[in-house]
Image (cartoon, rainbow, N blue to C red):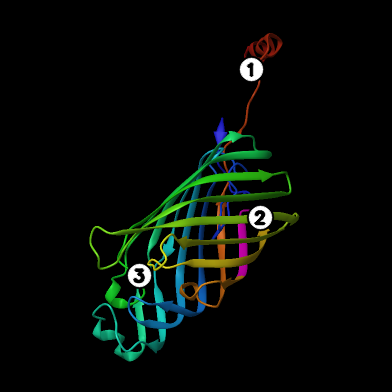
Amino acid sequence: MAVAMPAEGQLRREALVQPVGGARSGEALLGVGASRTANADFPLAGLGGDVTAFPEFHAAWAIGPRVVFELKGAARKMLSIERRDAVSSVDLDPSLADGTSRDVGDFELAVSFAPIGGTTGFSAGGHLAVRLPNSDETRGIGLNTTDITIAALFSWGSARWRATGWFGVGILEVPIEPFEQNDAFAYAFEALWNAAPDWRLSIGTRGRTSTRRVSPLGTGDLGEFRATVEWRRGPFAIDAGFGHGTTALSGDWNLRAGVAWTLAGNRQATHPPPTGTTRHHAREETS
């Protein structure tokens, strides 16, 4: 009999790269958190300032022992406008006159898989992701574009640590220019270490680099280094981390924290069939 029950898992909230291959089949994670990014830049709208995202949702599901599906995004984002360019490439919403922009954040659907290799040692596969627009570009926060990432994934790990990364191409839709796209080199890497039974540490980076010498507005370079600490107690995990943006679009420093609940994967509970002696005793007891 296969049962699913709360337990410690391998999936992580806000992971730069999920540790594909380390999760149990059927393992699921539900997380919620918040983040704060300083001095982010939005060149399409000609705005800059600090961005707060809350609540941020993250759901992950290990469809199989080496396949992870994810859905994540911010239900609410707020930009505290600290800089306005003299000219904007879009007509901004009049509500931004009070110095604040509020809207729903974009959501991302992704699947990571590693069919080559085992749960320890080397494994390889792929990563596919699509970012779906929610916020309108007139709000300054969003771009109202659909972006796709196609990448090769590699992983190496043991019982206590795992390093996973992917690199490939990001197909970016150019805002306010129909039927035009900008292809970028996209990458992500994260190393996860089980430092103690209840503690996990991670460090990694994620971003993209445009293949054009001059990128269309809204498709410029992104990059971030991030470190996270996570404390686990049974099915629950509390995480906190900080990051540093390496490009203007990524902002300067950011802080994030959240909580997650894990539903463990399938566990097989088998019961041996009754022996002839057992059946004989059962009949005697019944008599």
Quadrant in the rendering for residue 96: bottom left
Q: Is residue 74 left or right of residue 65?
A: left
Please give left or right for residue 177 compared with residue 43 in the image. left
Q: Which residue is mark 3?
A: 104
Q: Is residue 8 visible?
A: no
Which residue is the site of mark 1?
Answer: 273
Label 3, label 2: how many angstroms apart (C-alpha)?
Answer: 31 Å
Q: Residues within 10 Å of mark 2 (few under 14, many from 20)?
A: many
Secondary structure category for the residue under label 1 = loop
List x then y, in percent, for residue 177.
Answer: 25, 65
The residue at 71%/50% (across/down) is 161
Q: Nearer the viewer, mark 1 or mark 2?
A: 2
Give residue 191's mark: 2
Q: Position of residue 242 (x, y in %)?
A: 61, 72
At mark 3, the secondary structure is loop
Q: Give 76 or 97, whichever is nearer the viewer.
A: 97
Question: Is 201 rendered above or below residue 253?
Answer: above
Picture coordinates of residue 89, whole percent (x, y): 28, 78
**Residue ID at (68%, 9%):** 276
